[in-house]
Image (cartoon, grey):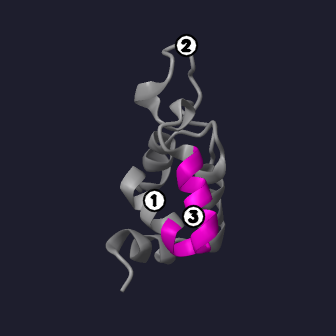
Amino acid sequence: MPKAAVKRFRRLPDDEQSRIIEMAWEDRTPFEAIENLFGLAEPDVIEVMRHQLKPTSFRLWRKRVTGRATKHTALRSPDVLRGYCPTQYKR
């Protein structure tokens, strides 16, 4: 049974679903940007990716994003401003 995050994700239009997955794959897009735009926090994005990807692809993705400074705003240098521009990802 899918969790609440996956159910919310499925209710979104197809183009927004694709954009969330694309943003999750991008190394430079922080999870916080996805949360600001779509209301899915990092654990929700992880659950969506677990549900949408093949098991091997999900493991590779998790290995790549775990602890990556560019995916977590708190780990980023304060000089990096990506992910905060309200017009960067238009809906």
Q: Secondary structure at mark 2?
A: loop
Q: Residue at x 63, y 73 (%)?
A: 14
Stretch of the chain drawn in magenta: 50-64
- Determine whether, in the image, residue 78 is placed left or right of residue 16: left
Q: Nearer the viewer, residue 63 or 36?
A: 63
> Which amino acid type corresponds to the residue marked 2 in the rendered image?
Asp
Q: Tell me the distance, in whole angstroms, between the alpha carbons under discs 2 and 3.
A: 30 Å
Specify the principal SS of the magenta part. Answer: helix
Q: Residue at x 38, y 68 (%)?
A: 5
Q: Which mark is residue 79?
A: 2
Which residue is the site of mark 1?
A: 46
Q: Position of residue 42 (x, y in %)?
A: 41, 51
Seen in the picture, residue 68 relative to 46 is either above or below; the reply is: above
Residue located at (66% from left, 67% from top): 15
Report the side of 80 relative to 36 (left or right): right
Other-residue count near label 3 (Cα within 10 Å), few / some / many at <14 / 14–19 / ≥20? some
Mark 2 vs 3, N-terminal side: 3
SS class of the residue under badge 3? helix
Is any part of residue 30 visible from this angle?
yes
Image point (43%, 65%), residue name: 47
Q: Amino acid at mark 1?
A: Ile
Could you give the CA–CA distance between mark 1 and mark 3, rounded to whole angstroms? 9 Å
Pointers 1 and 3 in contact (C-beta within 8 Å): no
Task: Give the SS element for disc 1.
Answer: helix
Counting from the top left corner in percent of width and height, residue 77 is at: 51, 17
Residue 61 sits inside the magenta stretch: yes
Q: Nearer the viewer, mark 1 or mark 2?
A: 1
**Residue type (three-letter) at the residue carrying disc 3:** Phe
Residue 75, x across and y down, in percent: 44, 26
Residue occupying the far top of the picture: 79
Left or right of residue 19, residue 65 in this image: left
> Which quadrant of the figure has residue 32?
top left
